[in-house]
Image: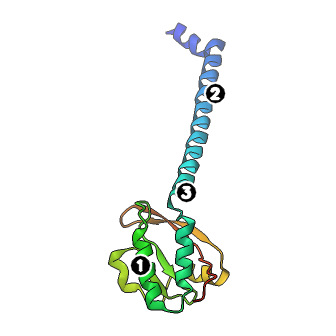
Amino acid sequence: MNSKLKFYQSIHFKIALVFALMLMLTLEIVGAVFVRQLERQNISNFKQQIELPSYIDNSLANQVGRKNTKKANRQIREILTEVNNNNISEIRVIDSKGIIRGSSNSNNHSIVGQRTTDNTVKNVLSTNRSHSKNIYDDSNHNRYYVNVVPLLSNNNT
């Protein structure tokens, strides 16, 4: 019994214990840095995947700028149905007055023609600057990335 106690009190055991603890600490730090870098890379890849091509942005901007809203809304609906991206749950097109002109969600076409109530959209319309945020839905435990981008139009026909 006394020899076991001497082993735990010896300098060899203490040096081995310090090295083992330092190795564990180093592995924890490297693992944490690796996981954080991987998370950033995945988020960056996701943001690139959900970005609409510029020709769609330009087409939507031209339609929002048209004076004939009925024709423009029909064209907006057609453009939004052509967007085939499984990562995007809904795209809404809202004009400078805050009126919803189109939605890519076929179950949500009843909101077309109504004024938006989203404060984020109203802020983007007033500042003309993009805004993005992450939302966590407690009811279904899903994360959503919301990106509000102003469409700039040169066409007023």
- Which quarter of the picture shows residue 17? top right
Amino acid type, residue under disc 1 in the picture: Arg
Q: Is residue 73 visible?
A: yes
Task: Residue under label 2, please give it.
Answer: 22
Amino acid type, residue under disc 2 in the picture: Met
Task: Residue under label 3, please give it.
Answer: 48
In-image side of 93 versus 29 (left or right): left
- Which quarter of the picture shows residue 73? bottom left
Per the model, the C-alpha gap separating discs 3 and 2 is 39 Å
Task: Residue under label 1, please give it.
Answer: 77
Kind of element beneath mark 2: helix
Residue 11 tag number: none
Percent coordinates x, y for residue 7 in the rendering: 57, 11
Percent coordinates x, y for residue 13 in the rendering: 60, 15
| Mark in front: 3 vs 2 | 3
In the picture as drawn, the residue positioned furthest to the front comes out as 157
